[in-house]
Image (cartoon, helix red, strand yellow):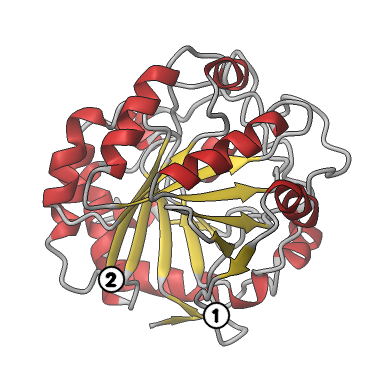
C-alpha cells in the first residue's frame, strides 16, 4: 500500500498514455502546439501494462487514462483490455475530448470501463470552435450522446474561461437538466503552455456557484467521498447534476489520494509540483519490479501537504501545458 508522509493512502493514479492531442485549446497550449516528446521517450504499451500491474500490486484500485488525448495513442485498446482483466482494479476510467472515441464505445462497455470524463468547455458550436481552434463540435456532440446512452457513467468537465465561455454556463446547465450527465465546472488553471499571461482568477468556485444560483436557486448539495475534488449539487427535476471543482483554489488538497504519471514516465505527486522521479529508466533497465516499487514509495513519502506548498517548493510551473502534465 502507498501511504504518503501525511498519512494519506494513495490508491488513485492518473496515467497519461500520450502527450499529443488533436485539439489546440487556447487555455492548454499555443496555437502552433508545443514540443511533444520523442516517440522513444514515451512509455510503450507493454511498459504501461507492467507499470499498472505494479501499481495495482501496491494497492492502487483506481486508474484513469488521460493524455493529451488518449485515443490518439496507437494500440490504446490493448492496454484497456489488459486492465479490464485485473481483479484488483476497482475502477477504470478515461478522460477524453470525445473526438475519436466513437468507434470504441461498445468495446469500452465490454471492458467494464466505469466512467468517461468528456472535456467540453462549450455546448455551442461557435464557442467550441473558438476555444479548441478546431471544427469538431458535431462529432463530439454525437459521441457524447452515444456515451450518455451507454452503461458508463458520463461526466462533462467544463473549465470556466474568463471572456470566452461564460455564456455557455447556463446552456450547459440546461444540458444536464435534460440528460443524466454530471457536469463539473472547473476553475481555470494556468497550465497553458505559455499561451497567455495568468494574473488572477475572476471565476473562482464561489463566483461560479453564485452565477448558477442566480438562474437555478433551488439546488441541494449532494454527499460525496472525502477524496472527491468536486462539490456536487442537484436541482430538483433535473435529469443530471452539477458540481464545482476548485482546481485553482485547491480546497480539496488535504484528502488528496492521487498520483500523476506522465506519458514519459515522470511521477508527479501534486499537480502544482514538478516530477520527482522517472520510472521509464527503471522499467527499461531489466531490473526487478521491486526497484520500481521502492521508487514509488520514495516519491509518495516526500509529498507536499497541498498545492500551495508544492508551488512554493518547486517554483512556478505555470508555463507548462496541461497536455504534458497529464490532464
Image quarter in which the N terminus is found: bottom left
- Residue 173, placed above or below residue 68: below
The residue singled out by tag 2 in the image is 56
Tell me if I can see residue 98 in this picture: yes
Q: Residue at x 17, y 57 (%)?
A: 112
**Front position in the image: 78 or 113:** 113
| Residue found at x 70% / y 69% | 306
**Residue 198 bears which disc, if any?**
none
Q: Which of 59 and 181 is in front in this view?
A: 181
Q: Where is residue 139 in the image (x, y as percent from the top left)?
A: 35, 20
Q: How crowded is mark 2: few (under 14 residues within 10 Å), some or many (20 or more)?
A: many
Give how far across and how far down residue 62 sits, in percent: 34, 66
Q: Which residue is drawn at 43% across and 43% down?
A: 178
Residue 283 % position (x, y): 31, 55
280, above or below 33, in the image? below
Q: Which residue lies furthest to the right in this view?
A: 199
Across and down, in percent, residue 305 comes to 69, 75
Report if the CB atoms under discs 1 and 2 are less than 8 Å apart.
no
Helix, strand or loop at label 1? It is loop
Residue 311, image quadrant: bottom right
Q: Mark 1 points at which residue?
A: 4
Q: Residue extending furthest front?
A: 237
The residue depicted at 41 percent of the width and 49 percent of the height is 181
Which image quarter: residue 133?
Answer: top right
Amino acid at each position: 500500500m502507498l501511504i504518503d508522509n501525511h498519512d494519506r493512502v494513495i490508491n488513485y493514479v492518473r496515467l497519461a498514455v500520450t502527450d499529443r492531442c488533436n485539439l489546440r485549446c487556447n487555455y492548454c497550449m499555443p496555437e502552433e502546439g508545443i514540443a511533444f516528446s520523442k516517440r522513444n521517450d514515451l512509455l510503450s504499451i507493454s511498459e504501461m501494462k507492467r507499470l499498472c500491474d505494479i501499481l495495482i500490486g501496491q494497492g492502487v484500485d483506481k486508474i484513469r487514462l488521460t493524455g493529451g488525448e488518449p485515443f490518439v495513442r496507437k494500440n490504446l485498446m490493448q492496454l484497456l483490455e489488459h486492465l479490464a482483466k485485473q481483479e484488483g482494479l476497482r475502477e477504470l476510467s478515461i478522460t477524453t475530448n470525445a473526438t475519436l472515441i466513437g468507434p470504441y464505445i461498445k468495446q469500452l462497455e465490454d471492458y467494464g470501463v466505469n466512467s468517461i470524463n468528456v472535456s467540453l468547455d462549450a455546448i455551442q458550436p461557435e464557442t467550441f470552435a473558438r476555444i479548441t481552434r478546431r471544427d469538431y463540435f458535431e462529432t463530439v456532440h454525437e459521441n457524447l450522446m452515444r456515451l450518455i446512452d451507454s452503461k458508463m457513467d458520463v461526466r462533462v468537465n467544463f473549465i470556466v474561461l474568463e471572456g470566452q465561455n461564460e455564456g455557455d454556463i447556463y446552456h450547459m446547465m440546461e444540458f444536464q437538466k435534460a440528460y443524466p450527465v454530471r457536469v463539473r465546472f472547473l476553475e481555470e488553471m494556468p497550465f497553458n503552455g505559455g499561451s497567455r499571461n495568468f494574473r488572477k482568477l475572476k471565476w473562482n468556485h464561489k463566483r461560479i456557484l453564485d452565477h448558477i444560483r442566480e438562474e437555478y436557486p433551488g439546488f441541494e448539495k449532494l454527499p460525496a467521498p472525502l477524496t472527491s475534488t468536486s462539490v456536487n449539487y442537484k436541482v430538483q427535476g433535473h435529469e443530471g447534476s452539477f458540481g464545482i471543482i476548485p482546481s485553482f483554489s485547491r480546497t480539496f488538497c488535504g484528502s488528496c489520494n492521487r498520483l500523476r504519471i506522465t506519458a514519459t514516465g515522470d511521477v508527479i505527486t501534486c499537480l502544482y509540483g514538478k516530477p520527482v522521479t522517472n520510472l521509464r529508466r527503471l522499467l527499461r533497465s531489466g531490473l526487478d519490479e521491486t526497484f520500481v516499487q521502492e521508487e514509488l514509495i520514495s516519491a509518495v513519502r516526500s509529498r507536499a501537504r497541498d498545492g500551495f506548498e508544492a508551488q512554493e517548493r518547486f517554483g512556478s510551473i505555470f508555463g507548462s501545458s496541461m497536455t504534458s502534465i497529464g490532464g
